[in-house]
Amino acid sequence: MKKKSLMKGNMREMSMLIALVIIIVLFTILTKGILLRPMNIANLINQNAYVVILACGMLLCILTGGNIDLSVGSTVALVGAFAGTFIITWGWNPYLSIVLCLLIGIGLGAWQGFWIAYVGIPPFICTLSGMLVFRGITLLILNGLTLAPFPAAYTQLSTGFIPDIAPDGITLFGTKLNLLCLLVGVAIAVAYVALQIKNNATRKKKGYETEPLPSLLIKTVIICAAVIAVFWKLAQHKGIPTVLIILGILLLVYNFITQKTVMGRHLYAIGGNKKAAELSGVKTKKMMFLAYTNMSFIAAIAGLVFAARLNSASPVAGQSFEMDAIASCFIGGASAYGGTGTIGGALIGALIMGTLNNGMSIMGISSNTQQVVKGLVLLIAVAIDVLGKKNFNWKSLLNLGKKA
Amino acid sequence: MGKNILEMRNITKVFPGVKALDQVNIEVEEGEIHALCGENGAGKSTLMKVLSGIHPYGTYEGDIIYQGEECRFRNIKDSERKGIVIIHQELALVPYLSIAENMFLGNEQQKRRGVVDWDKTYSTCSKYLEMVGLHENPRTLIKDIGVGKQQLVEIAKALAKNVKLLILDEPTSSLNEQDAKNLLDMLIRFKGQGITSILISHKLNEISYCSDKITIIRDGHTIETLDKAVDDISESRIIKGMVGREMTNRFPQREHHIGDVSLEIRNWNVYHPQFTERKVVDNVSITLRKGEVVGISGLIGAGRTELCMSVFGRAYGNRISGELLLDGKPIQLHDIPTAIRHGIMYVTEDRKGDGLIVSDSIKHNISLARPAFISSRGVIDQDLEAIKGKEFSQELGVKTPTIEQLVGNLSGGNQQKVLLAKSLFAEPDILMLDEPTRGVDVGAKYEIYEIINKMVGDGKSVLMISSELPELLGMADRIYVMNEGHVVAELQNDGTVTQEEIMGYILRDSNRNIQ
């Protein structure tokens, strides 16, 4: 019984994971294998880093009750503009500038969080205002022009790769491989297995319920295989992209916050029933403030990464990024009313969007058509979820046709 | 013998995994008030949903004979066209629309197809409001009138649909005794106008008061139909039918060990959060002792909930003044987390609206108010949480296969137990229970009383708000009577206090204010 309910809880994510695999296989065939070439995998990561980063922050906002942040695209551009001004125009130290830009991001978030949490402006309206204001300030700072290029020390952030420990790499099965990348891949897999064993041991020791062995084994094998496969591919190219490290850290941190901490539990509670959360001693205003402050902080990270990737600070950067982030969360199973959704789901959603983008680009499908496809995928993903619910009234849908 | 307006024959309704109704039979005579009794989950609501077409023809077995012909309702519109109207326990009114707009919602008075005739709407609305004795402007918004009046609007709405058979599901659950009596008297008046009523209620005194026949359902079976003219329809007789045994004692016994004063509220004043000039709690002083159950009686709007919530970390109200003494020491409770840390807990009367996160699991709900108990430095020990959740839900007798179950899938009584489990998890010394047995069946009520007894047995203090006087008389050691914001009487419940005495205090105080 327990196992069944656990499975059910993860149904949406499982079905989206299966959808992701199908999409990858489909595009691998359609692109005649180009999709999974080592260089393209590195590209895929670099191209979609910003969506995954933004989705981490957006999920927290959505959890609090389906609230979204429309201003993140503009925040990305504004932080890029600050970075450009500091580093290119004024020639400041890139690292100092990065820290400053992150602080600016927190400041922008605190501004929005204040109005939303403590004054009670609906998030949709407040962040719509932010979207216009931040974009406007970007245009003012940049005077409508693009600043370029950044120094190499800065662009490393997004387009660089971690240098290998062996200068010429190693050769295995006739292919030249990046040793560090391979080692990191293996290390992650080993660490994961060790963590599972340790968790299970402590559970047994304390007399807690343990996960059934077969499902645990299957899960562990699949995850380790996937990790090693990705790093094997990356090792054939230039190794670990710098941005993958940033992504990895963010995903781990936010997964931890949402799943294991009191703060995460409070976010879910507010989305589930705000009044009940309040009467249970959850400081709802403070949590809303934190969620939106965090969102702009995350947007600042995305802005820095994106500016480094473009190698310029552009006044039109980040347009419609908020929509990509929101779509990723919803495709990944977050509820439009709040209270449900996971970082893992948001990651899967972002990967689905990214793979669709990348695959269709390789096939030479125009960006106009791509938009149509992405829009429909969002609708279908959520529709599958609604239609798949046990209590969905199919009859009413059929009757609709009859009456008309 | 009059003519039957309705016969439901051998109704069987199966939900996945559960047989909700099994060969249920019911006959309702024209122009009578027919009560439907049974514990929560016995199948009363399901039966009424079958009748009104919410569960359409084809999803159940058996026949519905209404006014002499077999009916196959496909939806609620079909049954309403025949004059069968159901009023649900949770009122289906739109707060930001006017009384008139609500009354004709889905049944709009139209000039031409699709164009609303507002003059006709308002004048017809006034006519129906007159019939239910509600003196309000039809243009008043629903949100601006109280629950009792909203209930009357629902009934007027049913009249506007030309109702022949009126079904009321727990119509008095949120009404005070006076409003409830008015409503029942109205049903009796309707009988003269040829309107038949089916009344679902947990309040057995109301059923004895107004119904002509009583059909008792237990576990999806019809047990018996009692006729007022022939049978004994006392409360204990009905309870016997519902639970299948004589309940000689509706309130469990407890030993009284009353200790020192635990909480003292002195000169407490609270103003309304929106209408800041309105005083909702007026110079109230209350003491609470260890091991004591203290009841607060009063009508809706007496300021009982407002008193408790304002004490609970200022969860309600404006310009709160007064003193709080916990174990003799003055304390300030600025916010809810502080109140919870001081061992004070308030359990809301609205479990779905303000109490539980119905979209989340039992275990997450239980740990919500005191996550510090299952976490260290902000990180939750999920295994410990599961163990604690299981422990608490078992101790309180929550009937569920697993604590992963979503709270929304539980019955009302079980939800109430989860709400209590959640409050007890926070390890309170002082527990303020607001209508702890609302919408809960007789069996579950008894279990909740036992939980309360166990708590005071452990030396905790319970402050209990209840609109059911027998419950207060059965459970409380002392009773405060409140009216219009202030305490009008403090009674030692030594067995001599009667319901009439309490109502007397309230009515005399109300009269004093009028003069």
Image (spheres, coloured by chain):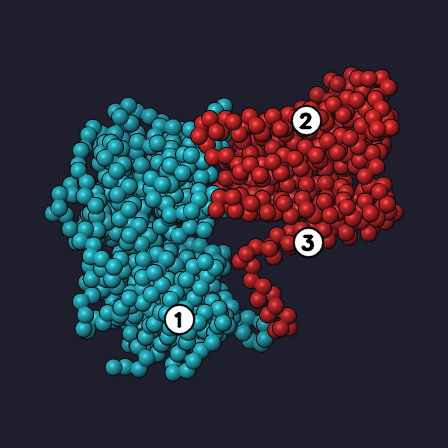
Chain colours: A red, B cyan
Tell me the residue that label 2 is attached to. Answer: A188
Which quadrant holds residue B83? Answer: bottom left
Which quadrant holds residue B125? Answer: bottom left
| Secondary structure category for the residue under label 2 | helix
Residue drawn at point x = 21 percent, y = 71 percent? B228
Q: Look at the image and tell me whether residue B328 can be seen.
A: yes
Residue B353 versus residue A347 in the image, above or below: below
- Mark in front: 3 vs 2: 2
Front residue (pair A85, A308)? A308
Q: Position of residue B127 (x, y in %)?
A: 39, 72
A149 left or right of B182 in image: right
Residue drawn at point x = 35 percent, y = 50 percent? B413
In the rendering, which numbered label is found on residue A380?
A: 3
- Mark in front: 1 vs 2: 2
Residue drawn at point x = 34 percent, y = 53 percent? B439
Same-chain status of marks 1 and 3: no
In the rendering, which numbered label is found on residue B11?
A: 1
Q: Position of residue B184 (x, y in %)?
A: 28, 65
